[in-house]
Image (tube, grey):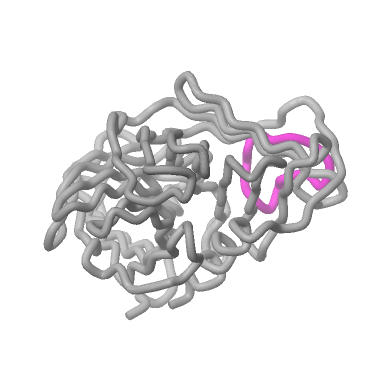
């Protein structure tokens, strides 16, 4: 799978990655990943979904999920210094998470992703511009708080430069990846990644999530998670869309937006449950490229 580097990045942040430095400045509007300044801060607006969890003991095992949220207004602020990530701030609903290298938190750019961990090792995040750098107009990712404490939150976010103009007809296909968080039927916690194929006639839209893999948050072992592959079907309205998720054993809902000046990209969030699984994720995809099998 082409999203292997993203999976490796998630595993790396759990093991502890390098960081350092500091910085900060007034926000700039997000106009694309290639336009993120080498020194400065951009604010990327979007939506996120959050869940609360409890775990038995400090080993983050046998977790229980509750209070899966509807989409929440979200903003991700990215600060770079000398082209390196120095600070990441995620504001979602009433929750605010900050990773700051100047305060001893660890941030690292890994290919087209940023992985982060706070100094205490209790809050983790992975943000992506696509597993192969195929995205320009969006940033998506996941985070977890309270690691090892017995309770906390898990969130997934889709942010970017929303399309002001979306075609009213025609057909388009988008390819990309997803990242998510999963409480599997075995009661264990995982982060996930999958390939994504989106088809739309700009009236309806289908999202196919397949080749799903998962990384155990306790052991960092990667394994197959094709049992939570799914297809989501939705209706397009304005520059956004919403619909339902259906897999072999899971069902739920999804929502999202088109990104870029001319709907060059698409992204969104989803939640689904079934078969003892609780699954929340986010995806980003761009027009062009081959469908990966």
Q: Is residue 32 magenta?
A: yes
Locate the C terminus by quadrant: bottom left
Q: Between 178 and 216, which is closer to the camera in this rendering?
A: 216
Q: As drawn, which residue projects farthest toward the top?
A: 94
Q: Between 260 and 138, which is closer to the camera in this rendering?
A: 138
Q: Is residue 73 magenta?
A: no
Q: Position of residue 79 (x, y in %)?
A: 74, 38
Locate the N terminus by quadrant: bottom left
Give the left or right position of residue 117, taking residue 248 as reference: right
Q: Residue at x 50, y 66 (%)?
A: 220
Q: As drawn, which residue projects farthest toward the bottom?
A: 293
Q: Position of residue 228 (x, y in %)?
A: 24, 61
Q: Residue at x 30, y 59 (%)?
A: 198
Residue 158 drawn above or below residue 71: below
Q: Which residues are magenta?
A: 30-42
Q: Position of residue 115 (x, y in %)?
A: 63, 53
Q: Residue at x 59, y 31 (%)?
A: 97
Q: Quadrant of residue 52?
A: top left
Residue 72 drawn above or below residue 236: above
């Amino acid at each position: 799978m082409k999203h292997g580097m993203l999976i490796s990045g998630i595993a790396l942040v759990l093991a502890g990655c390098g960081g350092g430095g500091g910085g900060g400045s007034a926000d700039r509007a997000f106009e694309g990943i290639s336009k993120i300044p080498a020194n400065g801060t951009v604010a990327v607006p979007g939506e996120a979904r959050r869940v609360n969890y409890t775990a038995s003991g400090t080993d983050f095992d046998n977790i229980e999920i509750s209070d899966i949220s509807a989409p929440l207004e979200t903003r991700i602020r990215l600060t770079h210094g000398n082209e390196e990530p120095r600070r990441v701030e995620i504001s979602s609903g009433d929750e605010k998470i900050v990773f700051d290298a100047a305060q001893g938190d660890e941030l690292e750019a890994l290919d087209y992703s940023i992985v982060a961990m706070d100094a205490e090792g209790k809050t983790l995040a992975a943000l992506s511009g696509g597993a192969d750098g195929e995205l320009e107009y969006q940033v998506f990712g996941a985070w977890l708080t309270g690691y090892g404490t017995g309770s906390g939150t898990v969130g997934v976010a889709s942010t970017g430069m929303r399309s002001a103009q979306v075609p009213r007809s025609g057909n388009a296909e988008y390819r990309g990846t997803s990242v998510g968080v999963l409480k599997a039927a075995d009661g264990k916690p995982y982060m996930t990644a999958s390939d994504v194929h989106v088809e739309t006639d700009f009236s309806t839209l289908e999202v196919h999530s397949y080749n799903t893999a998962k990384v155990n948050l306790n052991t960092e072992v990667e394994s197959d998670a094709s049992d939570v592959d799914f297809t989501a079907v939705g209706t397009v309205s304005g520059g956004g869309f919403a619909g339902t998720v259906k897999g072999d054993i899971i069902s739920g809902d999804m929502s999202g937006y088109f990104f870029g000046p001319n709907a060059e990209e698409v992204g969104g969030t989803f939640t689904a449950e079934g078969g003892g699984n609780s699954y929340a994720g986010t995806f980003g995809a761009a027009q062009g490229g081959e469908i990966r099998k």
